[in-house]
Amino acid sequence: MIVTDQLQSWLDSEFAALVDFARRSRTQYGFSTLDAAGNADEAAGLQLWINCRMTHVFCLATLRGDESARDFATHGIAALRENFYDAVYGGFFTNLDYATGAPVTEVGARKAAYAHAFVLLASSSGMQAGILGARELYELALDAHESYFWECEFGLVCESFDRGFTQSEDYRGANANMHTLEASLAAWDATADPRWLEKAGSILAFVLGEAEKIGWRIPEHFDANWHLLPDFNKDRPADPFRPFGLTPGHGIEWARLAMHYWAAKARLGGLSDASNGTDADDAPAGATNDAEVPAAPADVAREDSDLDRLPSQARALFLQAIADGWFADGEPGIVYTTDFAGTPVVHERMHWTVCEALSASAAFATYGQEVGEADVVADMERWFDTFLAFAKEHLIEAPGRWIHELDRTNSPSGITWPGKPDVYHAAQCVLMPNLPLTPTFAGALKLT
């Protein structure tokens, strides 16, 4: 992506401001969520996924040369190993009491694939940054993933267990698998263990196949045998993790992650010709292509022909999500959810959807530069400028302080996400324009 001096200056200063804001979350037992004013939300406790995402960001800051961030990254890795790890049953607690560091009730003792994916991400980024204890944390996360969450018969992860890993939830979700894909790429980039790239390919192939069936939209909710549950949570449409219907922001995020996977396979020479993929104009959002839905996801994902198609499939996801979510109700912003026809259901705008749109458009622009597709570069840079203008006008109230939720008139809201819990999405979106297209942010920073 072409970055002007003015944009470069803003990206650098905003990343530094986000990291400084994140420092406010440090507590004795890890990192807290932050309220709207940027103070610790003690009532929310210490949440595993927040601790991992903050740790990941401090690892990225360390890789960028901010040595003051190393202490925060080390603190995060240590908290995950010493406070969140369940030495009795294995795996990691979901939530700890802010004051004591003890697991919070039965919910806090549950083991969730979504949050465990972020443990893999944090430990992998920690290894890339040379953080003390990161390798040991990775081994603990690997053991939980292999022993309980990864279901070989499906090539996907299950959702959650009780503390002792004796009872698995019947529900299966695309969200936990999306972040397991992200974490698998991070683990592969940090360790070169081929099983992680195979897992990433298996997850991605299944979801792309399911998305193609419904017009390049991402289905979210399934039963234990991976049959779609189209009416799941219809009575709780604004759930923060399992909202009813479809989430355009996830279509955008899956599109970006597909490009990171493509970059990983390209690094291995797994593409017949990186510039031979069909342009997305030949496979527009909402249209199907001639690829059959894969019956054996991991095998299909390894075929060169499918890898060559990944960029166009990823752009189809991106463009359909934008068509469904952006300006969908007469106001700028990306609506939180839609029904299966693309009609808005929850009109609130989450900051992370715009962050992912910034990251994805920058990634596609960089891809276009690498393969010599000037039209892709121009189109995606226009989208990047559009989303950045929206973020500056509506989301960023001060450097490093991104409002996490807006209502349908773009006024601050908090129905689903009160406060400013973390800086993960925002930090990554201001890094992406300067990075090569690689499997991970941490790996890209090591190259720059």
Image (cartoon, grey):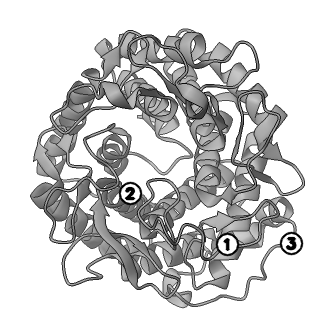
**Residue 131 appears in the figure:** no
Residue at x-position 50% and y-position 35%: 49
For residue 295, which numbered disc appears in the image?
3
Amino acid type assigned to the residue bearing label 3 in the image: Ala
Which one is in front, 202 or 109? 109
Residue 311, located in which quarter of the rendered image? Answer: bottom right
Name the secondary structure under disc 2: helix
- The CA span between labels 2 and 3 is 30 Å
Give the residue pinned by disc 2: 356
Give the residue pinned by disc 1: 229
Which one is in front, 180 or 46? 46
Which one is in front, 131 or 354? 354
Q: Are marks 2 and 3 in contact (CB under 8 Å)?
A: no
Q: Of the residues tagged 1 and 3, which is closer to the observer?
A: 1
Residue at x-position 44% and y-position 54%: 240
Residue at x-position 75% and y-position 14%: 88
Residue 62, located in which quarter of the rendered image? Answer: top left
Residue at x-position 57% and y-position 90%: 287
| Sequence-wise first label, 2 or 3 | 3
Amino acid type assigned to the residue bearing label 2 in the image: Glu
Amino acid type assigned to the residue bearing label 1 in the image: Leu
- The CA span between labels 1 and 2 is 25 Å
